[in-house]
Image (cartoon, rainbow, N blue to C red):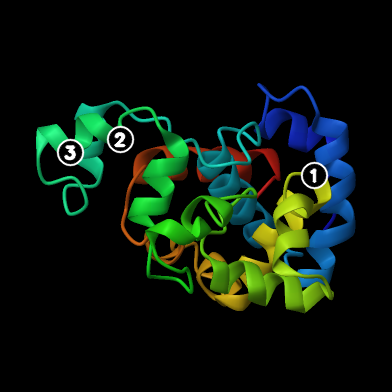
């Protein structure tokens, strides 16, 4: 099954670069087995939610202190601490992503260096390393590559394949897909809406 540029335009109507995204997906989706209506619908729906219809391919960490307290209470247990970090994306990333996912400590800068990139926000040095290895580049090069149309799309395809997400796409199980991608069910209603729309556009 081939996704047409007109179908993609219907699925991400707010995006001004549909032809570029289509060119990348046309090349990549078959390589990663995302090749049936249900698989393509699930993939595009999840990516559309994660990236604001393919418009945000780098994690936005420019949070106000109140938001830090709500989203990352473990890392910002007091108002005072949250206010020190408010609207400092680099400092926030270095704190919340330190010492996990293969990242070094807060001072290493790995948190920000390997913060979320791509259509499905690939996060952490380990993920960058394994994605980079799969296409024969370095983790540092992967960071730059994921800022391109092809790289943002390929990193999402790699994540999809690595986590065997076609299995859940074949079952139409959007909730499990969301948990595998997000760790929870954040945005589940919007994801389901994108998925239902994608199935309709693809004629399923």
Q: Is residue 165 visible?
A: no
Spatial separation of the CA atoms under disc 2 and disc 3: 7 Å
Q: Would you name the residue on which mark 3 appears?
A: 81
Label placed on residue 85 = 2
Packing grade of label 2 (10 A; few <14, some 14-19, many >=20) is some
Q: Disc 1 marks which residue?
A: 148
67, above or below 40, in the image? above
Q: In which quarter of the image is residue 4?
A: top right
Dividing the image into 4 quarters, which one contains the N terminus? Answer: bottom right
**Pointer 1 and pointer 2: residues touching (CB < 8 Å)?**
no
Q: Where does the image place residue 176, in percent across and percent down from the top left?
A: 39, 66
Q: Where does the image place residue 41, in percent across and percent down from the top left?
A: 63, 51
Asked whether residue 40 appears in the rendered view, the answer is yes
Closer-to-camera residue (38/155): 155
> Which is nearer the N-term, disc 1 or disc 3?
3
Query: Please, is residue 74 above or below residue 193 in the view?
Result: below
Query: In terms of depth relative to the viewer, which is nearer, 41 or 21?
Result: 21
* Label 1 CA crowd tier, 10 Å (few <14, some 14–19, many 20+): some
Q: Which mark is residue 41?
A: none
Q: What element carries label 2?
A: helix
Of circles 1 and 2, which is in front? 2
The answer to whether the residues at label 2 and label 3 have Cβ atoms under 8 Å apart is yes
Q: Badge 3: few (under 14), some or many (20 or more) residues near its Cα, within 10 Å?
A: some
Which image quadrant is residue 82 in?
top left
For this view, does 141 lie left or right of residue 186?
A: right
């Amino acid at each position: 099954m081939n996704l047409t540029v007109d179908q993609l335009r219907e699925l991400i109507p707010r995006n001004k670069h549909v032809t570029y995204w289509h060119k990348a997906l046309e090349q990549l989706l078959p390589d990663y087995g995302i090749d049936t209506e249900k698989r393509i619908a699930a993939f595009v729906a999840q990516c559309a939610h994660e990236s604001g219809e393919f418009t945000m391919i780098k994690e936005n960490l420019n949070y106000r202190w109140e938001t830090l307290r709500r989203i990352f209470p473990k890392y910002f247990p007091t108002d005072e601490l949250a206010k020190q970090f408010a609207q400092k994306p680099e400092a926030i990333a270095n704190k919340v992503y330190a010492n996990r996912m293969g990242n070094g400590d807060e001072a290493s800068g790995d948190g920000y260096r390997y913060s979320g990139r791509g259509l499905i926000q690939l996060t952490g040095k380990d993920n960058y390393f394994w994605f980079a290895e799969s296409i024969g580049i370095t983790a540092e090069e992967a960071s730059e590559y994921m800022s391109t149309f092809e790289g943002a799309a390929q990193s999402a395809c790699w994540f999809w394949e690595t986590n065997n997400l076609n299995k859940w796409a074949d079952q139409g199980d959007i909730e499990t897909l969301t948990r595998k991608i997000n760790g929870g069910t954040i945005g589940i209603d919007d994801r389901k809406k994108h998925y239902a729309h994608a199935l309709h556009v693809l004629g399923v």
